[in-house]
Every structure is written in C-alpha cells, then in structure tokens.
Image (cartoon, rainbow, N blue to C red):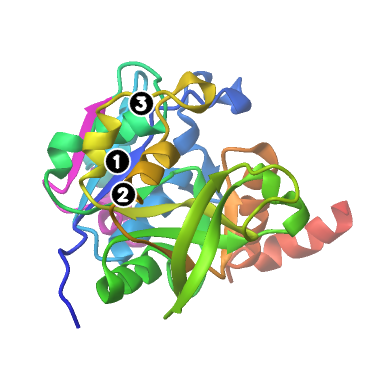
C-alpha cells in the first residue's frame, strides 16, 4: 500500500454569527449551543480526535473567546468539583481537553466566506494535507465520519469528501458529486456541481461538511476569487484543484444533523437524548406524549 502524509491537523471554522438562532446567539456563539449536555463544537472536536487528528485549528471571529475557554482548564471549577467529591464530572472535564499545545486559534477578521476562513489557517497547517470539519454538522454512527474518511485516504490518497444520499428530487438544494469507480467505502468523484438545476444532477450524493484536502488548495484560495454570495467558496477552489488532483468520496451511512438550522438542532437533541441510556427513560414517553 502506498504511504501518504498523515492527516495531523483539522480546521474548524467557527467565525459565523449564527443569525438564524438570534436572540440566543447574541452573546453565546452558536457553536456553544448544547446538544443535550455538550456544546455542538465539542462533538465535532471529539470526532476529529477519534480519527487520530493531533492538532485542532479554530478559525474564530469576534466574541468567540468562550470557545477557547471551553477547551482550556477551568481551575476554579475543577477545584470546586474536587472538594465536593464530584470525581465523575471532574474526570469528564479532564478527558475532553485536547493535549497542551494541540489547539490553535486564528482570526477571520471579516466574513468573506468559508474559503477565506480556511485560507486564514494556511500558516498553521503548512505544507501538509488537512481535515476540514464544518462545526454545524453533527454526525452519529458506530464509526466516526472522519475516521472513515482517514481510512479511505490512507488507501487512495488525494482529496476526500464525505457524501450522503438525498432524495433525488431534492438534489438541486445541495452540492452534488458525480459517481465513478467504486472504492472500499466510497467511490471516485467524476464531477462536483453546486446546486444543479432540477433534473440535471449527476447523482443524489451530496457533500455533507467533512473534507480531507491537499495543501495546494491554499494557493487557489489565495487568488480571492468570489463565488456564490460574493464570497470565497471552498467548493469553487475544489473544482480548480480537481483539474490536477484526484477526488474521492467517502460514503457516510450514519445520521447527520445540521445544527445550524433550528429543526436540525432540535432533532439532534432528541436523537442524542434517545440514544443515551441515562436519558432515554426520562424523555421517550414525554416525547411521545407531545406528539
């Protein structure tokens, strides 16, 4: 098997304003809204760490300092928990922390799009492939989405994007990929189309917010070319990169919850609560009664 550079670093763009959740996000970043008892961003960080990622790079904006605090030691809180004998809670807080020196925070000073946010992390990533995880997308499966992607990357190299199947009638709402040669857990990507016209989509596989990308994409993003919404788009940069490098798709068969939308956020809370042995007995009957 050919050896490829290890995926050591992951970018999490967390600079968004979260306007769809106002007024809740006036003072609290949308990434810190909780699904049951953990912030949305923590689920995504855990997915990355479980995949062997060693360094998390947060691309932040103003009023996002609470995210940095969340992934740091809270000495007063830890001391209080220890004095009260709350060892389980203390252990949980300690276990969730990335190792010292394994997180970086850089600013995206202006909202120029996802592609610009990724470009802001270029010097921290350096000349190596990296993972990109959109923190609004919370995923659940026996094997983490990024773990499956890393496994596919170690087999075939190149660039990897995670995809799921949608109703073909709704393909025009998503970024869609063309399906080529079958691979273990995925397939070769033949094309990428952002929100194709109805009836023209090359497949019903849509891009769901997880990527492994080669560092050459930074040079493309540096051009500052504007796309949809007059913003610098990752999809546009990937299309340029695909002219010279292969792209493969990891077929994710679990559940994805878009916590950047109100319905997705509510469904994530319901699904994760019902999946927990300590929560299901408390809420299952009440949810049924509400329905």
Q: Pointers 1 and 2 in contact (CB under 8 A)?
A: yes
Question: Against 261, is 146 above or below?
Answer: below
Asked which secondary structure carries label 3, the reply is loop
Q: Which quarter of the rendered picture does the N terminus lie within?
A: bottom left
Asked which secondary structure carries label 2, the reply is helix
Asked which secondary structure carries label 1, the reply is helix
Q: Is residue 55 left or right of residue 93?
A: left
Q: Name the residue under label 2.
A: 81
The numbered mark, 2 or 3, whose residue comes first in the sequence reads: 3
Is 90 covered by the magenta stretch?
A: yes
Q: From which residue to which does the magenta span run?
A: 79-107
Is 2 covered by the magenta stretch?
A: no
The circle drawn on residue 77 is: 1
Question: Against 234, is 256 above or below?
Answer: below
What residue do we see at 65% from left, 64% from top? 274
Residue nearest the viewer, comparing 16 with 154: 154
> Is residue 76 in view?
no
Q: Position of residue 276 (x, y in %)?
A: 58, 67
Residue nearest the viewer, comparing 207 with 148: 207
Q: In which quarter of the image is residue 104?
A: top left
What residue do we see at 35% from left, 16% from top? 110
The circle drawn on residue 64 is: 3
Counting every numbered tag in the picture gives: 3
Q: Pointers 1 and 3 in contact (CB under 8 A)?
A: no
């Amino acid at each position: 098997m050919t050896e490829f550079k290890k995926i050591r670093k992951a970018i999490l763009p967390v600079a968004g304003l979260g306007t769809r959740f106002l007024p809740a996000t006036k003072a609290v970043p949308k990434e810190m809204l909780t699904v049951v008892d953990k912030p949305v961003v923590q689920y995504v960080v855990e997915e990355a760490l479980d995949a062997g990622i060693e360094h998390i790079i947060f691309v932040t904006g103003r009023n996002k300092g609470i995210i940095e605090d969340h992934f740091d030691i809270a000495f007063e809180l830890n001391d209080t928990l220890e004095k009260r004998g709350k060892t389980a809670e203390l252990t949980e807080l300690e276990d969730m922390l990335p190792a010292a020196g394994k997180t970086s925070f850089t600013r995206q000073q202006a909202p120029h799009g996802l592609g610009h946010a990724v470009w802001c992390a270029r010097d921290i990533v350096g000349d190596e492939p990296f993972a990109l995880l959109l923190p609004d997308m919370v995923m659940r499966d026996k094997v983490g989405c990024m773990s499956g992607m890393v496994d596919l990357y170690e087999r075939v190299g190149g660039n990897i994007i995670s995809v799921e199947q949608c109703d073909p009638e709704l393909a025009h709402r998503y970024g869609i990929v063309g399906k080529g040669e079958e691979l273990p857990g995925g397939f070769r990507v033949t094309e990428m189309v952002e929100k194709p016209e109805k009836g023209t989509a090359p497949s019903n596989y849509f891009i769901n917010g997880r990527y492994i990308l080669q560092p050459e994409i930074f040079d493309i993003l540096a051009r500052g070319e504007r796309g949809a919404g007059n913003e610098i788009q990752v999809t546009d940069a990937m299309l340029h990169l695909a002219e010279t490098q292969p792209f493969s798709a990891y077929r994710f068969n679990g559940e994805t919850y878009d916590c950047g939308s109100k319905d997705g956020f509510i469904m994530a809370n319901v699904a994760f609560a019902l999946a927990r042995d300590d929560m299901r007995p408390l809420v299952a009957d009440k949810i049924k009664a509400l329905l």
